[in-house]
Image (cartoon, coloured by chain):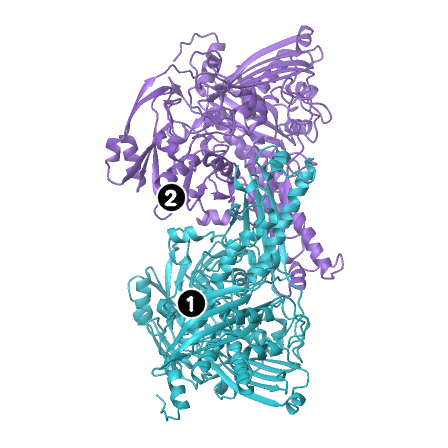
Chain colours: A cyan, B purple
Amino acid sequence: MSDATRVSSGQIGRSLPRVEARAKVTGAAEYIHNLRLPGMLYGKICRSTVPHGRILRIDASAAAAIPGVHRIVTAEDIRTVIAEPYYGPAFHDQPILAEGKVRHVGEPVAVVLATDPHIAEEAAQAIVVEYAPLPAVFDEIEAMNSAAIVHDILKPAGTFPDLKHLAGRSGTNVALDFHLRRGDTERAFAAAEHIFEHSFRTQQVMHTPLEPHVSLADAADGGVTIHSATQTPSFVRIEIARLLGWPENRVRVKTAFLGGGFGAKVYVKLEALAVALSLLARRPVKLALTMEEQFFTISKHASTFRIKSAVDGHGHITARQCQVFYNGGAYADIGPRVAQKSGFTATGPYDIPNVAIDSYEIYTNRPPAGALRGFGVPQLVWAYESHTDLIARALGRDPVEFRRRNLLRDGAPQATGTVMRDAAISAVLDRLAARLAWDQPFDRGAGTLKRGRGLAIGFKASISPTTSVATVAIAADGSCILYCGTVDMGQGSTTAMAQIAAEALGIEAEAVRVVAPDTDVTPYDMGTLGSRSLFHMGNAVRLAAQDARDKLAALAAETGVPPGANLPISEQFRRKYGMQAGTIVGAGSYIPAYAPPDSATGLTPNATPFWMVGGAGAEVEIDTETGRVRVLRLVNVADAGTPINPGIVETQLTGAAIMQLGFTLFEEMQFTDGQLRNPSLAEYKIPGIRDMPDRIEAETVDSAQQSGPYGAKGVGETGTFAVSPAIANAIEDAVGVRISELPITAEAVYRALRRAAGDQLEDL
Amino acid sequence: MSDATRVSSGQIGRSLPRVEARAKVTGAAEYIHNLRLPGMLYGKICRSTVPHGRILRIDASAAAAIPGVHRIVTAEDIRTVIAEPYYGPAFHDQPILAEGKVRHVGEPVAVVLATDPHIAEEAAQAIVVEYAPLPAVFDEIEAMNSAAIVHDILKPAGTFPDLKHLAGRSGTNVALDFHLRRGDTERAFAAAEHIFEHSFRTQQVMHTPLEPHVSLADAADGGVTIHSATQTPSFVRIEIARLLGWPENRVRVKTAFLGGGFGAKVYVKLEALAVALSLLARRPVKLALTMEEQFFTISKHASTFRIKSAVDGHGHITARQCQVFYNGGAYADIGPRVAQKSGFTATGPYDIPNVAIDSYEIYTNRPPAGALRGFGVPQLVWAYESHTDLIARALGRDPVEFRRRNLLRDGAPQATGTVMRDAAISAVLDRLAARLAWDQPFDRGAGTLKRGRGLAIGFKASISPTTSVATVAIAADGSCILYCGTVDMGQGSTTAMAQIAAEALGIEAEAVRVVAPDTDVTPYDMGTLGSRSLFHMGNAVRLAAQDARDKLAALAAETGVPPGANLPISEQFRRKYGMQAGTIVGAGSYIPAYAPPDSATGLTPNATPFWMVGGAGAEVEIDTETGRVRVLRLVNVADAGTPINPGIVETQLTGAAIMQLGFTLFEEMQFTDGQLRNPSLAEYKIPGIRDMPDRIEAETVDSAQQSGPYGAKGVGETGTFAVSPAIANAIEDAVGVRISELPITAEAVYRALRRAAGDQLEDL
């Protein structure tokens, strides 16, 4: 008899090793890059060389003449299979291939289909495209009032009712403006004891999943199967069905394991192009990007944040104004949602009675920006927690005490008016301070090596409202298969979902097998993004397993088993079906309660199903001769509710912190006139092992998300929130200079030190 | 908006073209023979050359030396991965590879694994096996009392409680003996006006699916995926899990379209061997049989039927004794169930108060026999309907009138005691007689071409109790996917199931997509066999769709839609989820009520969930100079309940009749001392286009199976029942000779004519 039929419990809080670990280390794990189908063609994209321009001529004659080239495809061809070839989750603004004009360097203009990927690449380079340049704009602030207009007219997707009012708006680069007003900010500022105003910027960076984007489409017999490294199989299915005018059940989207996602692989990326190519070629077509091509595909918003706070004589923040400008690049992707959903937390985890927030998503002629682990929130925390330290320092208050005095507490309303519940903000701050021994003396370094420490705390709402559906099938021997569309991209979701299902079923997590997302098999899920899966899908999985358990109980009752008899599942089946036969299918669907924000005030009584809270503390050492920043210690403390798998939660927090460390100290997409100067990992530096802090720690506070599955909530992004300002605050603590722009390179620190010393520095 | 959201009905009784037709004619349809996996090895089987013998030595040295050969595998190797390598649905008597002894010619003894199938074949022929011959037995009657014992001990599978008493029985070739006693046969015979006794025989034949057996196993990472042309994916999953000692959820069985099955591809055939080979080689392994190898894999029972009837002065049959001997070959396969389940209908569709049935499954040293389209019943009908005509003729009664006088009618008990319900026996006979214009003069032919006509009627129980489970997933646009494990092997089940789901959902059948069976995806189904799918799975599908419809109604109610508002499904989703999101999952499980037969009397109040009734009429022309039989007209009339898809029902009836026509006139596995003389389609003749009757017709009577989905019941086997005796009866009508052994070759008729004319014929 298998383990499956043993009645068990205690699956929550188990640091079960990841169930897919063995497959990954033995090489058995499947990735789409390894997939080949008979008769498959390889597509290679010819990309725009100018940031904004009209396409005058595409000369593919030389490319087409190369042996092995099957066909060259341009926008004109796409139109023969997709009538209106524009896609996007928030706006239908992105052409499958550029039509008439290009809007950023690296935009797909044409595709070569060939029997070999190297031939395709050679031929793609042989395509000659002539452009008539158009005026371009790259900076988000300039773009607010530029004569260079990226899109003639706004085309919001019909799927978001609250974006519909934007339809047809023209002559602007503002894709979305979100406004929130609460209290009387003007009066509060007039009455303020102190007013502080700062501006902060962040750079454009890349997700850098080590598995680049890849999609393989196989259109045949009135349907299409898309194998894609996507975080959102259900979304891709619906969007491709919309583009083709087909019912959903003719579109199948399959994923495998993802070699990282971080928001790069949400919504449609290569899928629409791959489908169009397969329809044109009547053969399977694979599009697999290089690392370099990812820079032109999707990125994280550069941003500018102007923040202004009023503080009274007791050190209470009485009012705050925030202006956030997100540089969305040439296509909106999910940027409008970033501007809106992060925007309403721009005032930070503080109890501020009067707030005014303006948050903007702005088109520019850069590669598009979308969601990246934190969905705009790390940009905000960077600003507001740098600002917090600047205020505390200016007021001569201890940064922890000043924060504590102003913290949002459960039961108090957040800026939106939503009353806080189950957000352990105080606990996170307290634990962080304790862990850093904040009240103890600290070694300040010596000579040219100065040491400092800093901390920061941030919070984030979850994307809402979104739906997850799961099903559970129990075989006659009691073993179980869980069907959920959550994509395991390294975050350990498969393991956690197995634990939740097992807990609800009263079996061991090892007896649950979780199948890979496949829209023909796994029911709808909005997507693996925004730290939503553990909460939303976790709830759906719990409901599905409970439904199955209820059906098992009914089966037992039907066959005369008295309640509480605790018969093995296999025996319950046998009594009903007379042999090892049957399947019990349980289904669970979860959508949290939600109230959309009022369009005028931005207020809502129910902005999010749960709050993520993350604090970071950094101890740094600055070489004052070179500006080099060495992070000695990086501590992350989070409210993750009740961890389902504490081991995985810890690696999630640590991984996120390391990612944000790269964005803080190194990473930057560098442009000159819209041309990306460093589109390769040789020139675009991500953290290496020698960049790791000497000590990196992660901890969760004792907490429970009442509405979550077994008290759990998402934690995928939490570790990113507070890293950047904690480091900047530590730097100021060490050497007294304030860096207000990311990344904090050695050069930036060196320049700040020299500037503080009164030296004149010419621009490099 | 897709068709799916239009509310519709009238899906039952639609002769919708088969939904897979386009994929099949364009070549897009998938078959396992076309499947190749990276790193895959090809296996080729070395088979026994003797019918019974001890294996003295296997010399694979020459084979192993052939370049490209990966490995040679024997029973010893199998034991290293499967501890007890014996399988079978009724008995665990069949070794994965022969251990110590072989029991029939063609039994698998060793396997070559090679990188190329041709190399594997060459190497398999290079293996030298030495045998010490053992006494063998081939005839089912001789085997009843032979000193040659095929199996030392009986090993019934634990899955069938009613076979458990056979465990450990030794010294016998009788694998199962079934006995039924009702009334007082002895007294009835003593009181009889007339007593008739005859004996009939049938030959061993093959299923001849034009797609030979093929299985591909891929064992990796603690699980195994088996791609197999099987009619019983769920059974294979459970049986492989049993052999490996793994839980069911680690075994995945996937099918594709089957190029015919007819019962050849039920239970485990190549799958256990393929799995063991993949575990040994740690690579995917494909086993694909040639047509020739199929003759040694599974076949239809040869049989002997001794039948004796008592008739009173009014032409009523008052008692009947039946002795049926099924030649099961060397391994039981499902033979014991054939003996039992068909056995209890051996007295025919007649109302006979006193019956005694003895039915035997007998081991011999022939290739194994199992289920073939009719599950033993065509052998029975052949006998009892030849017998019926012989009686009518002897009594000078019209065959139709004599049958009508004795028919079982609804409300009367069948031999088992089960009261007949929804079996349109009278209607089938009446319609058949009408269609043949039985009461009209008939052209008797001229010269050496004599014409005659005959009819016959048979019935069959369904296999019981068995379970089917189905699920339905409705996407947010109203399009639908149906998950059911029924295998489409040409019978049109995909189309019929889509119609049933659509009817229950109130949508068009075209909006339902049915996925291929895959035990990871489609819930449990006992198997696609015994004409059970339309009834059992049809009921499960109907229940699943109704469950989904109920959930849709609940969704509508939840979102404030008044009952009867008839909102499109897509709008119901949108109101609940705020966007195109969500999946509604409906589940349905069906197992009919059943009562097993009493072990002493064979009686039961509930032998089957439904009865299939089939009648055939034949008009033949005999060339008296050569014995050649030409079938001028073949009429099939059936009770199929209410046809879901009348067009498919008609082709099912016709296809079955043509198959049985082959068994009646041509097909025969010919043995000499256990050696099969004609294992190829060059020597084993199946019907060709020139063998078709000039007219072939099929019709269903007005009928409804109350317990079936929308009144339907299975029809896959019905067309086979009565073809053979109808032709034999027509031959006697034409030329006055009675053939009692199949096949009715020209030679057999010629010999009978000559014998009737008093000529002496020496044996050929």
Task: Please check whether the numbered discs 2 and 1 fall on a single chain.
Answer: no
Kindly tell me whether residue B480 is visible in this rendering.
no
Q: Amino acid at mark 1?
A: Arg
Q: Amino acid at mark 2?
A: Pro
Pointer 2 residue: B284
How far from the left and from the top, in percent, is residue B115? 30, 42
Q: Residue furthest top?
A: B190
How far from the left and from the top, in percent, is residue A187? 67, 89
Q: Residue at x 35, y 37 (%)?
A: B43
Rendered position, A524 above or below B347: below
Is A147 situated left or right of B71 in this image? right
Rendered position, A257 above or below A47: above
Q: Residue furthest front?
A: A441
For the C terminus of chain A, which image quadrant?
A: bottom left
Mark 1 packing: few (<14 Cα in 10 Å), some, or many (20+)?
A: few
Is A547 situated left or right of B69 in this image? right
Residue toward you, B701 or B266: B266
Kindly tell me whether residue A435 is visible in this rendering.
yes
Pointer 1 residue: A695
Residue B422 picture quarter: top right
**Dot 1: chain letter:** A
